[in-house]
Image (cartoon, rainbow, N blue to C red):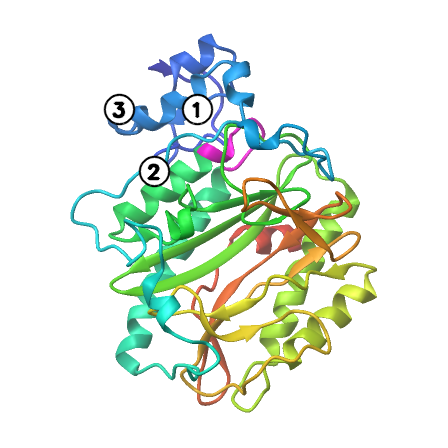
Amino acid sequence: MSTSTTAKTEEDKCLTCGKQSNFHCPNCEKLSLPVANFCSQECFKSLWHLHKIVHYSDVERKQAGNEFKGYNFTGKLRPFKVTPQRKAPEGTLLPDYAIDSIPHSERKADRKKTPIVVHTPEEIESMREACRIGREALDIAGNVAKIGMTTEEIDIIVHNAIIERGGYPSPLNYLGFPKSCCTSVNETICHGIPDLRPLQDGDILNVDVSVYYKGFHSDLNETFLIGNVDEAGQTLVRVAYECLEKAIAICKPGVMYRELGDVIQKHASAHNLSVVRNFCGHGVGRLFHCNPTVPHYANNKAVGTMKAGHIFTIEPMINEGSWKDTIWPDDWTAVTMDGKRSAQFEQTLLITETGVEILTKRNSGSYIDRLKKE
């Protein structure tokens, strides 16, 4: 473990816990890799079995599997090596898909026949706990994301933050998803798999965090600017956030779910941006995905009217070019058809008797609030 001699900055955060760091990994230094900071020997040792994977050679880091051979990518992003799936510690309360990857409860719940759940006060309190953990994990990841860090390292941070708080990362092994969060870079719309690609100056990065805690799921995401992002990229990210804000602003009892798409598309179109149609917001609670279905585009045919006790996500995906998407051969990574960038923000919401409560509301001074002030 080497002692850092440079002045401390906001980027000098411990990779394990997010506290101010005093040391950095000597192996990263020897290999001329981006500095990995730690606050103590204890934090370094606790993360070593996961952190050491970034010491792979460049050739090893770029190995992405045979499924991409001959594939025509739509943009400049390329997959890097994905490390083996990690496990939750013994004793962690697991969702029903954690072992065999099959969400049995979701499959039993026929969304065409099942009404939107009206949550009880007790269930709402459980959701608040799950949402609090999700928000804390996402904030930690967003605060340390920087040039040179891999999305695998971000996945480690999210995984550890959720486990330390007694939760389970909802994406882990959901239908076989190999990681604990989704990291979607540049032209990736959603469901990007964390890998060993280092983040580059000018990237935009979406981190999607979901938590299973005491039988309930939460879901949220944000898009972060990495280094010096061009003006068009900054506008894309800002408008994506504004689309979410404007949709949340109309939520209250009596509003039809289909109305949200009209508000979102109107704002995106005003900035010559498009709205993804093939991925929607959704109900969330005891099930990771359930009714209602919440499309983000105009003139959709979503069924249902908001009632007090409904809990769901709004998560508009906004593109620079066409709204159309395609899926990489990994069967997860959704990218724009034209290779242009995409940005997204997501919150979990509760409809109250008089309006809406943002269960995953960001804390004061969080990333997007700072961005809006700049």
Q: Is residue 12 left or right of residue 49?
A: right
Residue found at x 42% / y 18%: 4
Q: Which residues are magenta?
A: 145-152
Whether the residues at callouts 2 and 3 have beta carbons within 8 Å, the answer is: no
Q: Compared to 372, does 78 lie above or below?
A: above
- Kindly report which numbered mark, 2 or 3, lies closer to the viewer in this rendering: 3
Measured from the top left, where is residue 25 in percent x and y?
39, 18
Q: Compared to 98, does 145 lie above or below?
A: above
Q: CA distance from mark 3 to mark 1?
A: 13 Å
**Which residue is the site of mark 2?**
17
**Which residue is the site of mark 1?**
36
Task: Give the mark nearest the N terminus, 1 or 2.
Answer: 2
* Residue 362 on the magenta span: no
Q: Is residue 198 visible?
A: no
Q: Is residue 112 left or right of residue 236?
A: left
Query: Depth check: 312 or 222 in front?
Result: 312
* Residue 146 on the magenta span: yes
Q: Compared to 243, does 191 lie above or below?
A: above
Element type at marker 3?
helix
Q: Amino acid at mark 2?
A: Cys
**Which residue is the site of mark 3?**
45
Q: Amino acid at mark 3?
A: Lys
Label 2 environment density (alpha carbons within 10 Å; few <14, some 14–19, many ≥20): some
In the rendered image, which quarter contains the N terminus?
top left
Q: Amino acid at mark 1?
A: Ala
Element type at marker 1?
loop
Measured from the top left, where is residue 185 in percent x and y?
61, 41
